[in-house]
């Protein structure tokens, strides 16, 4: 009930604070017989880790993943997969003054209000560091989903810089993870300006599910769209979600909207591609010191992908038992 | 796992198809000793029921609620509350032709794809009729929440007609449930035009939580914002969710955004008001016959309120056990 | 959390008090495409209903089941199956004096202690009447399990009258549901003596799972044996559970015990038959009036079968997702 | 669903195989503000660890616990508590031959049947080693329960050696954990004889809950007795459970049984002591090598206590939300 578990059948429970020994998680419900290696996971963690480019935080965390259980001779055994990542660059001393003061735009105060006291050394569980474990779990989920199913996220917009027509192959070619190298270059310039001003920027990430399996999602409360929204809004800094035409429906007539393919009806996938967008607020940790990301989007991209993969895998497994034969 | 239950501690399970004998639900986890009457529930159901105004479907459903268990001498007993509403105006014959054809923008096809066959007489569980039970359950939730906590939803925008400054006392004074009678009148005109053209319109509903209790939401996956998003996206026709500045963050700097009160940090409420908006798509059932709502928003308003109340009550109860004393 | 739901994938939620309008339940997670009729359920309810023989309570409840949703043209649709049974022979007046006094051996007092007040008209949710819904749900479960899998329960022992070698075909031929008509006749005599003395007797029910599917149960907490124990101990009046050699292991050496087939290892079924026994205490409601069962076992037999079928169906569905292919 | 989590509000998820790097677990839902140290946990782990006396396995595992998260400055923070214990004495080579053969009375074969393959190096998740984490979690649970509530288990019977009147202060004074040093001495002799014969013995453990809080347990499926049965039957080698008069009810009349205090009615605790017994089968691993316990009971005693504490803490927290005030 304390909300550190995601999923019903493919259950990911994460643990760890940004300033403890380590962070980690347990996946319960991964089917047996899936081939799984460290590399399968590390590649996505490397896309999320700090210090990867000029426009991310300079904090140094190698984020090397360890698999402590659940895999034998390169295959999952059907038992819990325990994952752990050591914390390295903690610098608790930076946070000593936070013992008695709250940071603006942060969860510091609400933690005190809720629990009566808190680990003041950092964001605690509210720290975005926790999302590393989600990325690791999402990488495991990908191994189980059909090969043709792909979740692709990219930076769509920062201020008035918009990727109009995404070029998916360019996403990993630029530090913003925009799906257009040209727009990305302009975004880098804008982000650097914000950095110099000790300020930050937000933006929009678009996520596409290519070749989504048919029939994912349950009719009433656990609609696919509902759990996608939940999964994505559970990411720190995400403040909005939409799919298909999203908020643009406000200007549409039904006769017009019915012609748009959105990939889900009644909360269930129909096999067509699904396109979503999330709004990511500007980093709150500004004017504190130089150790924050001036723009969260580049590193949030793999986190969004992970959450969508976690939503998909859960419904994928749930869908195996809806018919009598 | 089949997704007909909402909530962890205050668990609402709904059942029933639009064309069966009845629809209903069971609330498990309602605390004992809450005073509860039929009237407490019926008042909200009446705001959702069809046929209530010139701009809603003319289908006649009185939607009279029955409480079958869990209440004794006017108080909840702590045991399951069973709720039921008879179906009256079913007209299955209207749907006979749907046995072999699928309606555009509807869940008909995905049900067949998922389950191998379906009850072709209507939307089945995808029918918005199911939301009546949510409204009933939300009315029970309201009785448990602190009296000062109020969830207020209203029609904010249809096409370019926007309620700029909401007047909450006017919401129930017009058939659109807009928080401004003047704007509402224009909206009615617009909706009637769509009706005549056998078309439909969408829009935006804004939901405000006044005096939200402090500390609601859990730090990681079950953030308050995440479950609000899930609850609201589980409503048919909702295609987007945002809170605070929402998608407008794309144009903001951190220095600017940090000054906005959003009511939640780290996924936990801080006691300030929370403002959200959802995008509602235009009705899909157009050009079929005259028995659809040309605009879903007026009747979706109480459903949005109910889902938010259901999210709040669950976290409210969960919050009672987070401290040792 | 209030504990009115059983199962993880095949979820049964029951509601209703012995003295309300009705009792009922909702099955969420029943696969689509199962043929299901009223008769499939009624046959087992008739084995549990009061007034069926000289040695059961004379209370008159026909216990006619209604299916309110989830079945269309004789087949399950994959949506929630809502079941209801009207209460008929309530006689609340018999219980008027119970408003201020507690019955010995009953839950009256603990309900007050737990909830602060109670519905004093009867056993409330503690009433064995609630088990009718379990029997109904168990009947649905049976339709999904492989045809060769059979759960058979029978009265094994009352005082020193023991069925040594069960004759399964005789179980329904005598009012005690003993698997031996001769022993049953002696049991009837014994029970009638207890009735005349305004007293009651307990006993042992044995339950056999014939042709249990292989692989049911999960390795650690949700072992098959653990959930069977839980399911059976959740029945009112059951005070003990054992399987295989059970408490007789106290006298055995490992060399001896290893040769016994028990049907489960590491909490997982191996496909061999599983034999369990439960201890049922004597009826607590004695010397009150003539409306109690002098011996609970005959009517508890179908309840035990139902709970075992509910345990099996849940693991049967869970087992469909443990392998990658 | 894979069953590695116990509890609804105080959720313990365990991971790890007997022959992997480590075993561990995550507690989600521990209230904030509980004082907790390594010592609180280690004391119980030492009672369970192998090699502690002449009559336990000589395997050497120090079972030193590490707390990786969720505790700050000696207090729980309300966030997940991650626990880990390194595996030391693995000797996988002993198990090489098990790659192609199954051990009698073990879960080896059913794992292959269920998952399609298995980690053949030991019992995998079926290994009793997994119970160390339960003991650790149980130690945390104890810190939250009221101080006067005590769960005490002891070896009650091995073959015909019975502790008639338990002397609780003697339990930790003898290697069998019998509540009578005299009987314990005889039990040691008997166990040594079995060891020499490369055989094993079973027995009965009695567990007493002293000063159980009032109102624990939920009325229908999650009765206190039901979850106690589940928790205890989830322990490897436990094959039976009873409380109060247990299987002796078979010989009792209601007039006689009603006078016994059993501590639970309608599945809810009434505040009186609760006495239970579990049957523990003789160790299956006989005649293999000298590395098994000839009698599982001495080390199972703290595991039984832990499982009962885990059941109690969950209901204790659940009970905080059943009343409106």
Image (cartoon, coloured by chain):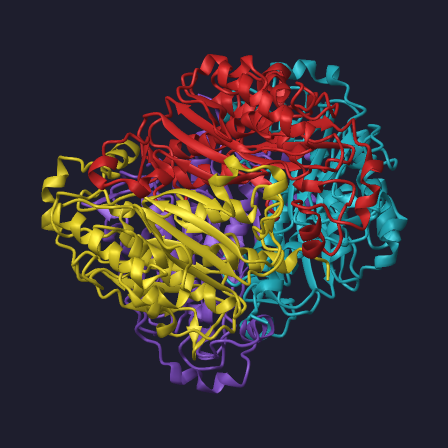
Chain colours: A cyan, B purple, C yellow, D red
When asked about the image quadrant of residue B55, the answer is bottom left
Rendering coords of residue D149 (x, y %) = 41, 20
* Residue D35 in sight from this viewpoint: yes
Q: Nearer the viewer, residue C135 or B267?
A: C135
Residue at horizontal 71 percent and vertical 32 percent from the top? D23
On screen, residue B159 above or below B315: below
For the C terminus of chain A, the image quarter is: bottom right
Query: Total of numbered circles in the picture?
Result: 0
Residue at horizontal 59 percent and vertical 33 percent from the top? D201
Q: Is residue D312 left or right of residue A290?
A: left
When asked about the image quadrant of residue C180, the answer is bottom left
Rendering coords of residue B224 (x, y %) = 53, 40
Residue that lies at the very extreme toward the right in this rendered image = A173
* Residue A247 in sight from this viewpoint: no
Q: Nearer the viewer, residue B61 or D10?
A: D10
Q: Nearer the viewer, residue D271 or B158?
A: D271
Q: Nearer the viewer, residue C163 or D266?
A: C163
Q: Is residue B52 left or right of residue A188?
A: left
Rendering coords of residue D102 (x, y %) = 74, 49
On screen, residue D135 above or below A25: above
Rendering coords of residue C202 (x, y %) = 29, 46
Residue at horizontal 21 percent and vertical 46 percent from the top? C200
Q: Is residue A17 left or right of residue C81?
A: right
């Amino acid at each position: 009930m304390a909300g550190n578990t995601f999923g019903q059948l493919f259950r990911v429970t994460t643990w760890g604070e940004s300033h403890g020994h380590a962070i980690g998680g347990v996946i319960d419900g991964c089917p047996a017989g899936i081939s799984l290696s460290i590399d399968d996971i590390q590649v996505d963690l490397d896309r999320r880790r700090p210090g990867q480019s000029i426009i991310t935080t300079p904090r140094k965390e190698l984020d090397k993943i360890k698999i402590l259980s659940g895999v034998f001779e390169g295959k999952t055994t059907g038992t819990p997969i325990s994952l752990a990542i050591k914390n390295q660059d903690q610098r608790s001393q930076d946070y000593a003054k936070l013992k008695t003061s709250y940071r603006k735009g942060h969860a510091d105060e609400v933690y005190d209000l809720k629990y009566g006291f808190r680990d003041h050394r950092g964001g605690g569980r509210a720290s975005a560091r926790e999302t590393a474990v989600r990325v690791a779990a999402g990488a495991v989920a990908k191994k189980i989903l059909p090969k043709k199913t792909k979740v692709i996220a990219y930076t769509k917009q920062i201020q008035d810089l918009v990727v109009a027509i995404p070029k998916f192959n360019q996403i990993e070619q630029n530090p913003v993870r925009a799906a257009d190298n040209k727009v990305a270059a302009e975004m880098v310039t804008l982000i650097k300006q914000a950095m110099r001003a000790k300020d930050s920027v937000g933006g929009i990430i678009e996520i596409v599910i290519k070749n989504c399996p048919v029939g994912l999602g349950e009719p009433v409360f656990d609609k696919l769209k509902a759990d996608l929204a939940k999964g994505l809004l559970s990411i720190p800094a995400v403040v909005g979600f939409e799919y298909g035409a999203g908020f643009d429906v406000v200007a549409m007539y039904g006769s017009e909207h019915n012609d748009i393919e959105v990939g889900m009806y009644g909360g269930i996938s129909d096999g067509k591609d699904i396109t979503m967008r999330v709004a990511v607020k500007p980093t709150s940790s500004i004017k504190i010191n130089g150790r924050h990301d001036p723009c969260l989007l580049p590193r949030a991209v793999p986190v969004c992908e992970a959450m969508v993969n976690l939503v998909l895998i859960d419904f994928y497994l749930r869908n195996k038992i809806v018919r009598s034969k």
